[in-house]
Amino acid sequence: MEETFFSLLVPTRDRAVTLDGTLRCLSAMNYNNYEIVVMDNQGGPEVKELINTINSPKIKYFRTHKVLAMPDNFEACLNESKGDYICVIGDDDGLMPSTLTIINDMILKSKAEILKLDKHQYHWPSTGFEGLGNMLYLTPLGVPSYHNSRKMLQMYYDTKITFAELPCAYKNFVSRKVVNKIKDITGNYFFATSPDVGSGIANLFVTEMMFYTGLPLVVNGISGSSSGCACFFRSKGKKVLQQSLKEFGKKNMGELLHPDLIDSAAVPIGIADSMIRVKERMFPDDDSIKVNMAGIIQQVISNLLTDPASYYDNLNDAKKLAKKHNIRMDRYDIPPYPGDNATIKISKRQRGFSIDKNGALTGISVDCNLTGGIDVADAAKLAEGIMPDMLAYWTHLWDEASKK
């Protein structure tokens, strides 16, 4: 079988503890034609020492000449890669061992240029969520399907779908042809303040179709240093936020975000910055695609109870953004403050099957303390062993669809 050349991009800075598991995981793919490109963003010596210890011929190590903002570090990593398809992997994430074999088969059959993956979720022992350390949450199989890129783009800007449904380069696969189309327009592929969100929007703009694989091949790591976790839970992310602002050379979010927004650490408002900036760079004259600011405010309000400690900060930001755009707040149903003793709602530490009211399987929870697992590499192998043969599953679905 023909083998696509893949580039797994791992931008990192001072996270050798989790990077160890990520690199051992990525080095263990049951596929030959790929590279792992590590871009060390001026971190300490631990990362280079780790690379030397792992000593994998797949790993190509590079180091930036100075500390870069996240999108610039992503771009530097991309520019050192050679693959026909790229996938950005966080330095606490992993892929199941069969991932590249399955994605290669999907590319050859579907001819897809952007492939959206589902994710399992693994809490590192260092997770910021008490009681969930070393828990693995498995996602059931979905059904592969094509989606019109233009319709998805319009739905996203109208806030009818969330960024989680975008085909970002982060933990999904994107053709080099798509990357180059975007670079021809903007100069850089990763140019938005949120490079994952920005890449997802840009990918939709330059393609006709997105291919949803329906397969959970990524193990999404949640560790004490996870940027995503810090962003979504504002009360936990102050340290990560300050580090990010320092890398951008900004004093506060007001200096970083677009003038149409406000000084805010609320996630939907930060994401809206990338929405505005990608539109300005790629389709400024397309009046059919506009940021639904009322919808952005609704997203902030909908998340008020997600992080009770940040309830009033987020509510006040919603009010400020509404005032800036002359949007009435009485159009929204605002949940009452849950009280000073309220905490972030998280899953209980329990293993087994999760079933919905209709009897359908919605997930499997695995306590990795009982399996001897200690990191995302172990979690990825465990997920591979528990899940059905996904290559056989995909092949069967494709063959059946081809008969119709």
Image (cartoon, rainbow, N blue to C red):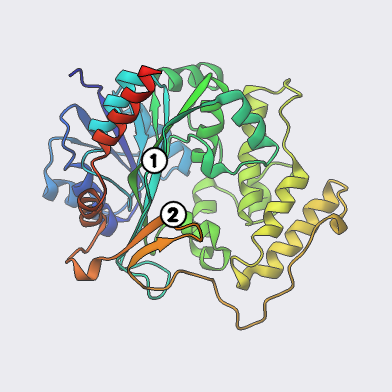
Callouts 2 and 1 close, C-beta under 8 Å: no
Residue 354 x, y percent position in the rendering: 40, 62
Helix, strand or loop at label 1? It is loop
Tag 2: residue type? Answer: Ala
Q: Residue at x 45, y 55 (%)?
A: 227
Q: Does residue 44 appear to the left or right of 254 in the view shown?
A: left
> What numbered label is drawn on residue 360?
2
Residue 19 x, y percent position in the rendering: 27, 52
> What numbered label is drawn on residue 171?
1
Q: Is residue 282 above or below residue 231?
A: above
User: Which residue is nearer to you in this view: 141 or 4?
Assistant: 141
Q: Is residue 327 above or below residue 210?
A: below
Q: Residue at x 71, y 74 (%)?
A: 337
User: Which residue is nearer to you in this view: 396 or 122?
Assistant: 396
User: Which residue is nearer to you in this view: 344 or 403?
Assistant: 403
Residue 222 x, y percent position in the rendering: 38, 59
Q: Does residue 175 appear to the left or right of 368 in the view shown?
A: right
Tag 1: residue type? Answer: Lys
Residue 111 x, y percent position in the rendering: 37, 18
The crowding category of the residue bearing disc 2, from other C-alpha atoms within 10 Å (few below 14, some 14 to 19, many at least 20), is few
Q: Is residue 191 visible?
A: no
Please report whichever mark, 2 or 1, sits nearer to the chain's N-terminal start.
1
- Asked which quadrant contains residue 100, the reply is top left
Q: Residue at x 66, y 41 (%)?
A: 160
Which quadrant, please, contains the C terminus? top left
- The residue mark sitting in front, 2 or 1, is 2
Q: Is residue 293 above or below residue 228?
A: above
User: Which residue is nearer to you in this view: 39 or 102?
Assistant: 102
Q: Does residue 109 appear to the left or right of 142 in the view shown?
A: left
